[in-house]
Image: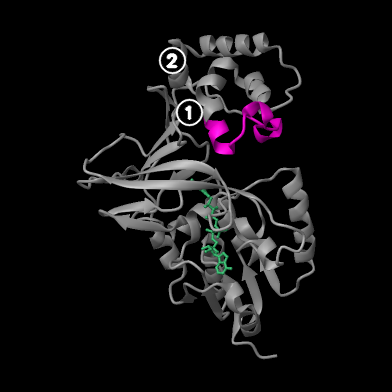
Amino acid sequence: MQYKYDYLIVGSGLFGSVFAYKARQAGKTVLVIDKRPHTGGNIHCETIEGINVHKYGAHIFHTSNKEVWDFVNSFVPFNRYTNSPVADYKGKLYNLPFNMNTFYALWGIRTPAEAQAKIEAQRKESGIVEPRNLEEQAISLVGNDIYDILIKGYTEKQWGRKCSELPAFIIKRLPVRFTFDNNYFNDDYQGIPIGGYNKLIESLLDRIEVKNNTNFFEDRKYWESIAAKIVFTGRIDEYYEYRFGKLEYRTVRFETETLDCGNYQGNAVVNYTGAEVPYTRIIEHKHFEFGHQEKTVISREYAAEWQEGSEPFYPVNDKKNSALYEQYRRLADTECSVIFGGRLGEYKYYDMDKVIENALNYF
Ligand SMILES: Cc1cc2nc3c(=O)[nH]c(=O)nc-3n(C[C@H](O)[C@H](O)[C@H](O)COP(=O)(O)OP(=O)(O)OC[C@H]3O[C@@H](n4cnc5c(N)ncnc54)[C@H](O)[C@@H]3O)c2cc1C
């Protein structure tokens, strides 16, 4: 059978765009469709007052994979942005990740030895040997103070459940740094594309046919008839018409506001770790690119239960959903002309670098 395209790529997020780029480079014919009015999926930025606003949540690129870093930098240079979030608990500020600056603010101590002794004493005092839930797990790793001030409220808002009711496995490690280093990531490379993420996507999709506002499911038979292979980066359960049931997600609601001031909070990311503040973070977008615009744009983030119609952001990888996904995955394994990729196609939280790596490897 003669097809119009070698590949139909459903979704113009990072996975779809990298795949499309590689396919085109290999001389294949490609069509990309996306149901959203823009390309880029969740890394898409909207320009407000000259500021690149991360419409679907703050995105900070970080990786230790040199190949991936060189790949993205070959499309657009990245700036030197280093993620150093600050936590606000009842009006007092603490540096993240947990490091000597945090311990100084918490306890007024100045040396690594003092900090280690303090954490060790609190861990011992808790008497927890086999943590039965996330609360016990966190206390057994970092002690009571860090848990109460910096973990409890934030995590409970994120999951919409008490830490004592959440499984321990959610937190495997809690990195604690005994240096005065506020760099959140341990990766070798990090930054933001100069001029924003849209530049990266536009370069990847350069000279590739793209149709926006186009939902695969609205004319499934037609889309299936035009390409030899389909790369599907939407929800895998939707692809199979939910035959085993619906996968669950967590979502985030954003309240975005333009303010008549040049600098609202002095940092791109401020986490609110207390239960009395309903949002989890405030993002001030201009600081990702060291902006000097007259105004500023902030987004308050509210974690929420996902419902049909809201954005499926974070897969819930608990036992029930993992087992359900496994059923879909087995079906997917039997397909010879459909490739499932990306965070929705594989029902897995992936950072951007991993998505790019996967797309490069697939091709
Ligand atoms: C709130 C949040 C913050 C994040 N922050 C970071 C970060 O700081 N650093 C980092 O490395 N990673 C971060 N990530 C992860 C990052 O967003 C992902 O790794 C990456 O965007 C995934 O790309 P993707 O192509 O798999 O999915 P997506 O970007 O979701 O793209 C999928 C595309 O498919 C389209 N689509 C779906 N169904 C259909 C259909 N039926 N028909 C047509 N089109 C369809 C969608 O419209 C979408 O455009 C974050 C994720 C979230 C949710």
Residue to which mark 1 is pinned: 273
Which is nearer the N-term, disc 2 or disc 1?
2
Residue 318 in view of the camera: yes
Judge whether 20 appears above or below 258 on screen: below
Name the mark on residue 281: none
In the image, 92 versus 196, the foreground residue is 92
In the image, 287 versus 244, the foreground residue is 244
Q: Could you tell me residue 104's position as x and y percent?
A: 43, 15
Q: Is ligand 1 closer than 8 angstroms to the Cβ of mark 2?
A: no
Q: Amino acid at mark 2?
A: Tyr
Element on which disc 1 rests: loop
Quadrant of the rendering where the N terminus is positioned = bottom right
Q: Is residue 164 magenta?
A: yes
Give the alpha-carbon distance from disc 2 to disc 1, as whole Å: 18 Å
Start-end of magenta stretch: 154-173
Residue 60 in view of the camera: no
- Say which of marks 2 and 1 sits in front: 1
In the image, 250 versus 2, the foreground residue is 250
Look at the image and name its color scheme.
one colour
User: Viewed as shown, does residue 101 lie left or right of 25?
Assistant: left
User: Viewed as shown, does residue 157 lie left or right of 110?
Assistant: right
Residue drawn at x 37%, y 39% is 268
Name the mark on residue 104: 2
Element on which disc 2 rests: helix
Residue drawn at x 43%, y 68% is 37
Residue drawn at x 71%, y 75% is 337
Q: Residue furthest bottom?
A: 2
Q: Could you tell me residue 151's position as x and y percent?
A: 55, 26
Quadrant of the rendering where the C terminus is positioned = bottom right
